[in-house]
Image (cartoon, rainbow, N blue to C red):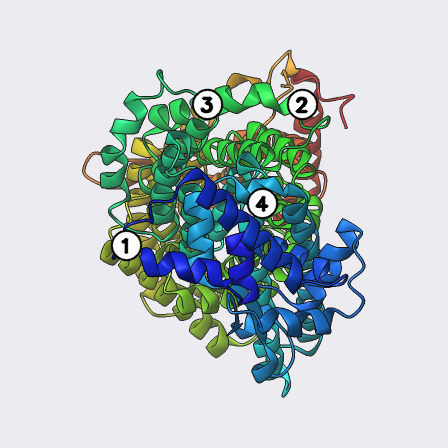
Amino acid sequence: MFFTCAMFGSIPPEIDAVQERMQGSAPPDLSADEQAELRAALMRHFLGRIDANAHVLVLALQWMATMRKGVSADILRHIAAQEQVNIDDPQELIRHLERLLVVKRRVVPRYTYTGAEADETLLFLHDEMYHWLDRNLPGAVSLRPQVSHALVVWYDAAIAAAEAERFAVVDRLLTLGEDHAEAAALRAQRDGAQRRREMLVLDRLGYCYQRDEAEGVREYNLLAYIAIISRLSGYGVMLRQEALRNHYRLRGGVPFAVEVECAARWLLRTAYNEESRALEMLDQLAYYADLEPQFPGPHYALLHLAEAIVLLRMRPDDRPRIKRALDAARTIVEPEEPQLQAHADEWIATISLQIAYWYGFYYRLSYDLYDTIEEYRHGLRLAQWIHRSFNIFLGLTLQNLAFAYSEQGNVEEARHCGMRALQLNQRYGDEYSVALSWNTLARIEIRAGQPIKALQYARQARATFERFDSARGLSLCLPVQAEAYRKVAEQQVDIISLQEQTFADAVATFEEAHALLDREGITSAERRREVLQGMGCTYRSWGLVLRNRHDPSERAAHYFTQARAWLERALDLANQAQPALIQMDIHEDLASLYVNEDIYDQRVYQHLDQIQQLAPPTYRIEPGRGLRGTNRPVYGFWRELGQSHLQRMLCGFGKYDVGWYKLADDGQRILVHIGNKADMHQAGRHLLLMLAYLLQYTHTSVMLDRAMNLALRELRLRSEDDLKLIAQEIYRTAREYRLVDSQ
């Protein structure tokens, strides 16, 4: 009651008399009768100060004890409606409140309110009042949980309004383009709406804690994770401060489970911020890992996931440890997944989705693309239970699913998923995620035979990664941009000067990527192999163009030599740390290099035989058996086998036309035969097997079209007798391999 009188700014004289008896800060020594009389005096004074309408003011003050983020007329109106209290004019109530001694008006940041800067103020109790409440009535905020609930509802509406404003601006910016005259103003408006939304979400988090501490923990986990993957470090710090402040206010300390989750996020931030100390920090967190048997729970799922993510980014070759971490995380949360439909827990759904997402990444590194796609699809099913952040996680998952579909030869589905991911990331994600989408689309368009479009996408990705100064992002996009240059150059046969410049751009970009890997200490075998192989393929393509152009210089021979050196380096690396499918691809590149040079000796077949040996038996078409088949196919094996038979077909025609040689120990090439009909038989045999494998890979592809064109080019050079011989061999091979009735 004394507190209430103080809030009204009026103290009865009896209190003043007691204060005169006090010595220093020592409390007065009052008898029981004196205490009773003092309480009665306070009650008389209080009742004499209020009228019939003042109860609303008292209620408002009680609400303000819960409303730690400030009070506005609109908030009061909303709370009163929820409490079924008629307050008539909220503005008048605001004026009454601000006349009280314990209420102060504070200017709040622009992101909380719209309107003129001078008017952006809220009412608060004095900090001393909040401190007194927390110290003397630690349960005060939970006495009125319905107020916290009403505040969460109000913030939900305010957040939705800010998000709607941001969407409208983003849509207009996408329509007009970044170079439009209005673009700068639109970007500022977009960023303002985003900041306002972030601060509203931050305030809402405090009320989630007040409504239910467990709910607050789940909400903080979700928001903090999104901040990390969106690379919003400053906002992540603000969320952490808000969460810790509420833990200390409501509980007096931080629960151990929350401490473990904070440690996991600490680790995650270093990985997403590309800090080299991430591995060192991983070792420092062994303390928490040792305590898991004593304090098990979902909090450890996040710690195991963080360990897997750090290793996948920093030490991807440590596959056993990565798998153990992912398995441990899934073991913890998987029992909760069946209950998500009945009572959706967005945090459990989020961490389950992220486990599936990184499992997909893990399988992708070994080119187990069937399992990759299954994990991403599982993630998409889980995403439906993450209502408020659904589109952020959906965009990231679709983006990676698009890449997997592309590698499986399903270009149209890949393009559909990739474009959907781009649209989601543009509206709901961050700029870094948009850049990753551009890069994925560039890879897809290269596979689809659209290098000009791929180059456009790659340039957009690179511009963003350079703005973020992201070594990882650049290591992803520079090889893609260089490969797009190479493919564009191959098509520019009509303008020699332009073709030469584009090949030079491809080489320069690959060199830039190579220097980046060395400079930043990026040890990823996948990234380095991609650069080495890409450089080799570029020199091979450039040499072939010069050879077809009958260039009189020695450049073609020099470029072929360069190509072989780069490809052999790529093969050495792949043999140590890359899956069989990658090794097969490099062997095919080396074999095609000999074919491009019209060099037909045992060296070309050494590479082609390696491809056959590396292919799992289930992917081979065998005599008398045909195709075994598999219910978990990685279509890339059929692609590589098809390309190897393409090279064998070209070798057959080449040996017939140019001759079959044997490479002697002294390096001399000795002609064995030329114009041998057996070579024509081989060409026909491998023509059929080439088509069988490539059609198993996909029924429509740029690769299949190229193979058909090369076959037709060779067939047009043959005599009628040769064509009959080839047709007979095709029919015989079809019967031998049981392909007669196949598609």
Q: Amino acid at mark 4?
A: Cys
The location of residue 739, given as percent across then percent down, is 71, 22
Q: Amino acid at mark 1?
A: Ser
Residue holding disc 3 = 297
> Which one is closest to the eye, mark 4 or mark 1?
1
Counting residues from the start of the chain, the first of labels 3 and 4 encountered is 4
Counting residues from the start of the chain, the first of labels 1 and 3 encountered is 1
Q: Mark 2: which secondary structure?
A: helix
Q: Mark 4: which secondary structure?
A: helix
Q: CA distance from mark 4 to mark 1?
A: 38 Å
Residue found at the very far front of the displayed protein: 33
Q: Amino acid at mark 3?
A: Gly
Residue drawn at point x = 45 percent, y = 58 percent: 15
Q: Are the residues flagged by discs 2 and 3 in contact, CB closer than 8 Å?
A: no
Q: CA distance from mark 1 to mark 3?
A: 48 Å
Residue drawn at point x = 67 percent, y = 28 percent: 340
Q: Residues within 10 Å of mark 4 (few under 14, many from 20)?
A: many
Residue holding disc 4 = 208
The location of residue 397, given as percent across then percent down, is 59, 43
Q: Residues within 10 Å of mark 3 (few under 14, many from 20)?
A: few
Counting residues from the start of the chain, the first of labels 4 and 2 encountered is 4
